Image: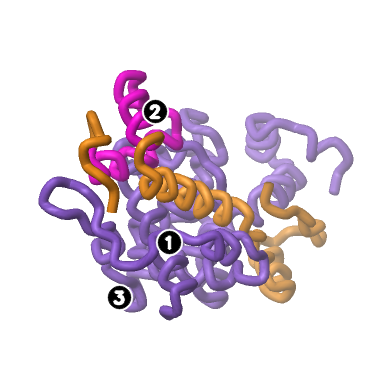
């Protein structure tokens, strides 16, 4: 565990509770600065932030599952589409 | 596909569809079916329910397109219809029993607000697990464990890539509630990945 004297403004609990808002860029500047000071001094919380960023990147990188071909055909039949609409060959971002 | 339709805005496509242009609806389907499938498959966690929800969603879109006034974007409107179709499927199943209590995922703190970590808290291997494409199914499984109200927000925000305001508009939650659910969902997934790397399930 880390020495507590080096956390002038925020505890780890407060810091972790604010990490998503920090990642979204939504914190007011004074709170953001206090949080960044905490992160500079607290390696576990800095690691926690890095791991939340990894989770976000991993989710964004998930390949979008394609609708199975038979289901895709049935959807177009149910909707009465007159011709087969080409399947978008897209991946996430 | 009719040449040129793919370059039209959503607003123009809707106008054409209301005028009776079937091709415009086909283009709306082509444009949104992947996103609708992706959301409802993630929410329902199985192909059969997701297929029903996708069909229900697009039939609802056909039925209600006249009500679409453009107060929100077409994307928001379609995601909301898709979300509701998936929720209806889940409600008909009456129980959604493979979820976990995510409070258990929140980090422990001592009485002064400092963190108590029982395990080495993070490890480069955890990043490798999460970012390894072959383990994407693992991550999908963990997302599927989230209670539905967290799963939906996480899928819309981090998988589908919507902004917080659009997620709030789709779910009719406040932006603050979206952020809170997103935060807890990300923490749960982080803890699941950590437990996996350290030899857990």
Tell me the crowding category of disc 3: few under 14, some 14 to 19, or many 20 or more residues within 10 angstroms, Cα based. Answer: few
Residue A59: percent from left, percent from top:
55, 55
Q: Quadrant of residue A8?
A: top left
What residue sits 57% from the left and 75% below the top? B47
Query: B180 or A9, which lies in front?
Result: A9
Q: Colour of chain A?
A: orange
Q: Say yes or no: labels 1 and 3 on the same chain.
A: yes
Write down the residue under mark 3. B94
Write down the residue under mark 1. B189
Q: Colour of chain B?
A: purple
Magenta part mainly helix, strand or loop? Answer: helix
Q: What range is drawn magenta here?
A: A11-39
Q: Tell me the quarter of the image containing the C terminus of chain B.
A: bottom left
Write down the residue under mark 2. A26
Tell me the crowding category of disc 1: few under 14, some 14 to 19, or many 20 or more residues within 10 angstroms, Cα based. Answer: many
Mark 3 or mark 1, which is nearer the start of the sequence? 3
Q: Residue furthest right?
A: B3
Secondary structure under the numbered disc 1 in the rendered image = helix
- Spatial CA span between label 1 and label 3: 25 Å
Q: Nearer the viewer, mark 1 or mark 3?
A: 1
Q: Quadrant of residue B177?
A: top left
Q: B116 above or below B166?
A: below
Secondary structure under the numbered disc 2 in the rendered image = loop
Query: A86 or A36, which lies in front?
Result: A36
Residue B82: percent from left, percent from top:
49, 55
Q: Nearer the viewer, mark 3 or mark 2?
A: 2
What residue sits 28% from the left and 58% below the top? B106
- Spatial CA span between label 1 and label 2: 22 Å
Q: Is residue B201 left or right of residue B20?
A: left
Q: Which mark is residue A49?
A: none
Q: Say yes or no: labels 3 and 2 on the same chain.
A: no
């Amino acid at each position: 565990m880390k020495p507590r004297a080096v956390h002038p403004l925020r505890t780890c609990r407060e810091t972790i509770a604010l990490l998503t808002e920090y990642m979204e860029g939504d914190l007011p500047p004074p709170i953001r600065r206090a949080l960044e000071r905490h992160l500079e001094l607290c390696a576990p919380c800095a690691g926690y932030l890095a791991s939340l960023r990894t989770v976000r990147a991993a989710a964004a990188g998930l390949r979008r599952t394609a609708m199975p071909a038979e289901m895709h055909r049935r959807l177009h039949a149910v909707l009465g589409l007159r011709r087969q609409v080409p399947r978008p060959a897209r991946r996430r971002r | 596909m009719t040449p040129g339709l793919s370059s039209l805005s959503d607003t123009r496509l809707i106008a054409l569809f209301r005028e009776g242009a079937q091709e415009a609806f086909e283009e709306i389907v082509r444009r949104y079916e992947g996103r609708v499938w992706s959301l409802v498959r993630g929410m329902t966690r199985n192909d059969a329910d997701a297929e029903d929800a996708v069909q229900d969603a697009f039939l609802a879109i056909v039925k209600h397109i006249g009500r679409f006034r453009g107060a929100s974007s077409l994307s928001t409107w379609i995601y909301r219809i898709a979300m509701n179709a998936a929720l209806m499927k889940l409600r008909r199943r009456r129980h959604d029993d493979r979820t976990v209590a995510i409070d258990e995922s929140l980090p422990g703190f001592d009485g002064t607000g400092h963190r108590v970590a029982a395990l080495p808290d993070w490890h480069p291997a955890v990043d490798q697990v999460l970012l390894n494409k072959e383990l994407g199914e693992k991550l999908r499984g963990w997302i599927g464990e989230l209670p539905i109200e967290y799963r939906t927000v996480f899928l819309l925000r981090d998988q589908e890539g919507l902004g917080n305001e659009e997620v709030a508009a789709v779910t009719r939650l406040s932006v603050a509630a979206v952020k809170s659910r997103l935060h807890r969902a990300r923490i749960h997934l982080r803890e699941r990945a950590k437990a996996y790397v350290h030899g857990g399930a």
